[in-house]
Amino acid sequence: MNATKHEVLQSNYLETSYFHDNVDSSEYIIEVKNLEKYFNGFKAVDGINFKIRKGELFSLLGPNGAGKSTTIRMLTTVLKPTSGDARISEYSLKREKNNIKSLIGVCPQENIVFDALTAEDNVEFVGRMHGMSADDVKERSKVLLEKMNIAGRKKPAKTFSGGMKRRLSLAMSLVHQPEILFLDEPTAGLDPQARRIVWDFIHELKTTGMTIILTTHDMAEADALSDHLAIIDHGKVIACGTVDDIKRSSDNGNVIEISFFSREELIKAKQQLEHVDSVKQIICGENNKLTISFAGGAKGFKRDILNRLESFKTLHFREDSLEEIFLKLTGRELREN
Amino acid sequence: MKAIELQTIQVDAKAIQTVDAKTVRKNDAKAFRAVDSKALHIAKKNVKEKLKNFGQMFWTIAFPIMMLIVYKLAFKDDDGSYIINGLTVFSMEFPGIVVYTIGISTMTSAVMFAMSKKDGTLQFIDTMPVSRGNVFLGAVLSETIFMNIQLVIVFVFGYALGAHFELAMLPLGYGIAMIFGVGAIGLGLIIASLLKSPEAANAFGMLTHMIFMFVSGSFFPMDHAGVFFTPHYWVKQVFLQLTVVGDSFSDLLYSCSIITPLSETTIFPIWVGLIIILAFTTAFIALGIKIFQRKTSL
């Protein structure tokens, strides 16, 4: 009866979640239904549900041990679910996992490459396992390795740096042009420059219409890449939706500070913004500065303000980061083990 | 009335669950058995990996030559004192070298499978449309290629060092060695299933092989009944009698044709020995696949 603050917050998020969208179910390429996984009595995944639209990038966000990788390993057919099922394209995970294997590409968390083989041999092997012809696989491998900037290297993969192995692993997962790509912590252990290269490549992949499922414990990564995301903790989905949806549901409002060239401009702006639904409070400060508290996502609000205001001097946002929202939801830090 | 309805619903639900589980099991079994050209690509990948592995190449090429030289030096027959029934001791020990060389596949295959478990490549392959049947066949094919190289080296160098074998019976001896080799892979698979690290698989694979070599009397003849319980003994003895001594096919039909360390003859004809080798191979490979599947299908 006495729900904790976290439980109340979590239920708020789920009520505004993705499940209640009035979307035709045929738009979803993945539907996860009450998926559970036990390991010797320990519940690693606790009856999770979510849906993923075709062509979107969906992130599973959560701390280490939250159940993200176990979920991915079930969806990629490596682990058998204890109960529940998922529909991937038209196939049941439980009954038709062999059909699913042809649709998916997997870039595992660890750099799983065949160390003794060259980059080309690695990519070609995966292509052959997916039934590609020798000519097709050679051509595709050449394109991908050039894209990843590791073409023409004749040395075995064991001599590659971590970043190169990561890029090779990505190339291996893409050789057969999968409909659905699973990326398990794709930038874990990469330096900022290599991380940016991988992000740019993921952005590029999104434009091809490929559905991408990404796990991460990096809030910035989820924020930068995701169309939708699910926050997982203790094997349960505790929030699901767009980044803005999740931020909008936050009980603490975000704040924007705008300074104007004149008092007249400030008063005019105040009058215009008072009628905006998401605005909670407007404070007129010194030096022609307006401080506005608002609920919901910053991106949408920013667009709204820019459309309404004729001129202003400076504009500063201060919003709840996903990190802060995660903390509110779970009561613990994201990087906590 | 309500109770009956409830019961019907429960029975139906149970029936659906049973059918569902059966379908899943049937699909899994079908998928496991599916074997196609992907096994050849897996074998090709394994061969490429092995060719770049110094340890594997040592066991494949250097080790058989080393064993032949050691035996040749240990059983010099310069003064004729090492002649038994017209054959040198080196020739009589030659089958033991064949068994040792091929049996080392227990260790190499244990390391290969344990490595694929540890580095995640097995799970990675599991995400692709490839059956475990293809994975096992690919492994057996690649190991067999290296066994062939080992056997050719052993026969060529053995002949050059003076080992006697009947050329007409050589293909049969070769075949027996290969069948034994497949059994050795099965034993390696069992070891890899039960142990977590490739290092442990390496040590335990070698230990198992050495114990079998000693107990079977493959290094030097042993006078105890334990030899009959090792595949190594049967391979060595059948190979010796068919390929080195040169018993003909017709000898296979006679009872009491197998010579044992306990007496001159036994009640067994040689073909029983062949069946025992086949039985050991089938048992090891079937058990290996079963245990490996159980331990790695999560």
Image: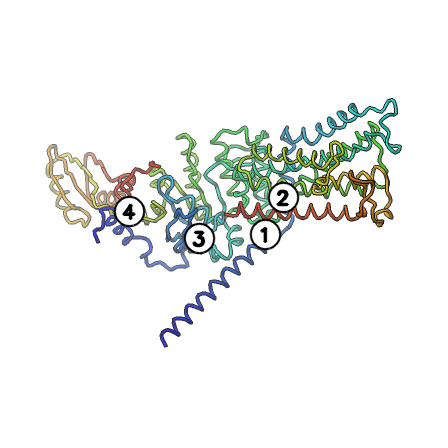
Q: Are marks 3 and 1 in contact (CB under 8 Å)?
A: no
Query: From the viewer's perspective, is A76 left or right of A216?
Result: right
Report the residue at 73% width, 45% height from top. B277
Nearer to us in this view, A269 or B228: B228
Residue topped by disc 4: A246
Asked whether the residues under marks 4 and 3 belong to the same chain, the reply is yes
Q: Which of marks 2 and 1 is in front?
A: 1
Q: Which of marks 2 and 4 is in front?
A: 4
Q: Looking at the picture, how far across and down is residue A155, in whole percent? A: 58, 29
Residue topped by disc 1: B32
Asked whether the residues under marks 2 and 4 belong to the same chain, the reply is yes
Q: Given the image, what chain letter belongs to the residue carrying mark 2?
A: A
Label 4 CA crowd tier, 10 Å (few <14, some 14–19, many 20+) = many
Using the image, determine if residue B19 lies above or below residue A86: below
Report the residue at 44% width, 68% height from top. B11
Label located before the other in sequence (2 or 4): 2
Q: Do the residues labelled 4 and 3 touch (CB within 8 Å)?
A: no
Residue topped by disc 2: A134
Residue topped by disc 3: A82
Label located before the other in sequence (3 or 2): 3
Asked whether the residues under marks 3 and 2 belong to the same chain, the reply is yes
Q: How far apart are marks 2 and 1 (CA)?
A: 25 Å
Label located before the other in sequence (4 or 3): 3
Nearer to us in this view, B243 or B32: B243
Q: Looking at the picture, how far across and down is residue A216, in whole percent? A: 38, 40
